[in-house]
Image (cartoon, rainbow, N blue to C red):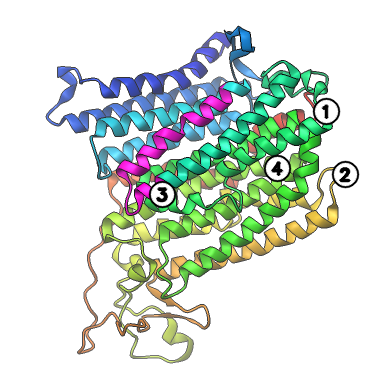
Amino acid sequence: MNHTALQLLLAGLVVLPLVGALAALLPAPPGLRGKNPDQAVLRHGVTVTGVVLAAAIALAAGFDHGHPARMQATTDISWIPALGIRIHLGVDGISLPLLVLTALLTFLCALYSYFRMPTGPSPKAFVALLLTLEAGTLATFAVLDLMLFFLAFEMVLIPMYFLIARWGGAQKQAAAWKFILYTLLGSVVMLLGLLLIGVKTGTFDMVALATDNGPKAQLSHTVQLLAVLAIGIGLAVKSPMWPLHSWLPDAHTAAPTVGSVLLAGVLLKMGTYGFVRIALPITPEGMHTFAPYLAALAAVGIIYGSLACLALVRKGAGGDLKRLIAYSSVGHMGFVLLGIASMTPTGVNGALFANIAHGLITGLLFFMVGALKDRTGSTDLDTLARSAPGPRTAGTGAAALLPAPSGAALYARAPRFGGLLAFGAVASLGLPGLAGFWGEMLAMFGAFRPAAGLSRPAFLTFMVLAGLGTLLTAAYLLLVVRRVCMGGSVDLAGAAVLGAADPDGETGADPDGTPAPAPAVPDLARYEYAAWAPLAALTVLAGLWPAALLGLTDPAVQQLLGGGK
């Protein structure tokens, strides 16, 4: 595909969602209204996001895969000459997978919303906000000017705020305010760091700044330290890095299903992408100084996220399944930050792979948890596990811990739904052969042998903590499967008992010992197959064929870390 066609495709990816958002607010032409205007505007959202996805796939197909380190489909137009700000767009092996992931997840969210619109105000505003959010996210991964990056980075905040505040669940206003305040304050600090780089070098061009013999040579060690500290705080809030993560569980718990999918699937990636695209190549000396601290906070985040999930999954803890997956994201993104902090090609490639894997797997899990809430009216783990089978009357020892034949758990009531939920859980814990394995493994390999000048004993300690985190992750996700899918009551102080009496005396049986009938849980619907199957298929494909993604990212990472060489 020629350069002009690729230019138009990349520009269309950014502009088309904005045009679609404006069109969604206008009255629909008479021939397109149909009998239900609400469905017409939701159909408009599916159409626009579908066209954007098609453009992203066409861009990926026309991309020169033989030279993924070279910036392609570039557009460079002067915008504000007085400030040296240019409309500079481009894509390489680092940003291309993120562009496709964003287009895919947004299309799947629009498709899901067409059949299961969240409760709230007019669908017109919902579709317009969804498309604006897509435009800002795609622009973040496509722009090559620091000021444009900042504008795109901020552009997603307002749509996500309203998606949470207007279409969210309980405590939505508080969660939305917490989200916007945390991210805005972090962004203000980040802007200072970006301006510092621009003032000292005289340019905001990210490509020019990434080369060793370019304008970044004018950045002294002290300036790099200040720039990394300021930019890193803003990126760490969005990543989210412990201890700047506390907005995330509340936002996820309150957000509508599609809001949680996009928040976890693409918005969190904007922060880690900024570290790779800006901090590593433009301020390498500053990153080298702060890398051990970033790795330490990443390792703490991995352990903290896992322990928080273990606390939530405990029987009687009143843990929320949606909140648990949000805390799991803190741990998973900790692996991404650890890989980046190693400052090695292995670690950074692992971080980029883990970014994509997390978007696929956690997007699928949030879709399923939202659907589970629609079916049962709750995401409370104790409530979901209370529909366990009645106590087994025969068998002793280990046999007594097996599910009762008349089980009312998710496997028995909706086997395909339960099976797919279990698949998402084992993919999230990093089972070999699925996408979650490769990113975490490569991030730990990067920590095993960090870049020259970094303390290897310190990074070995961080690697061991990350390894412990993988064990804790496996523990809480398997307990989730046991409780939700098998109907087990889990007591972390002892054994996991299926069909055991709850603390309040409920056993899942009538007083005469007859098992209580389980409420009906519909199995997977056709639109759910359509929205979720691509994520499951890509999770398997990336796990079995990691070279497809690593072949794109590795040459670009090598060049980025090599100062453009």
Q: Residue furthest right?
A: 453
Which residues are drawn in magenta? 148-176
Please say if 399 is above or below 9.
below
| Mark sitting earlier along the chain (2/4) | 4
Please say if 350 is above or below 219.
below
Query: Mark 2 highlights which residue?
Result: 453
Residue 143 appearing in the image: no
Mark 2, residues whose alpha carbon is within 10 Å: few (<14), some, or many (≥20)?
A: few
Q: Nearer the viewer, residue 126 or 361?
A: 126
Query: Mark 1 highlights which residue?
Result: 220
Mark 2 and mark 3: Cα distance apart in space: 42 Å
- Mark 2 or mark 1, which is nearer to you? 1
Query: Mark 4 highlights which residue?
Result: 340
Question: What residue type is disc 2 on?
Answer: Gly
Query: Mark 3 highlights which residue?
Result: 175
Question: What residue type is disc 3 on?
Answer: Ala
Q: Which numbered tag is attached to residue 528?
A: none
Mark 3: secondary structure: helix
- Residue at 42% x, 24% y: name it: 52
Question: What residue type is disc 1 on?
Answer: Ser
Mark 2: secondary structure: loop
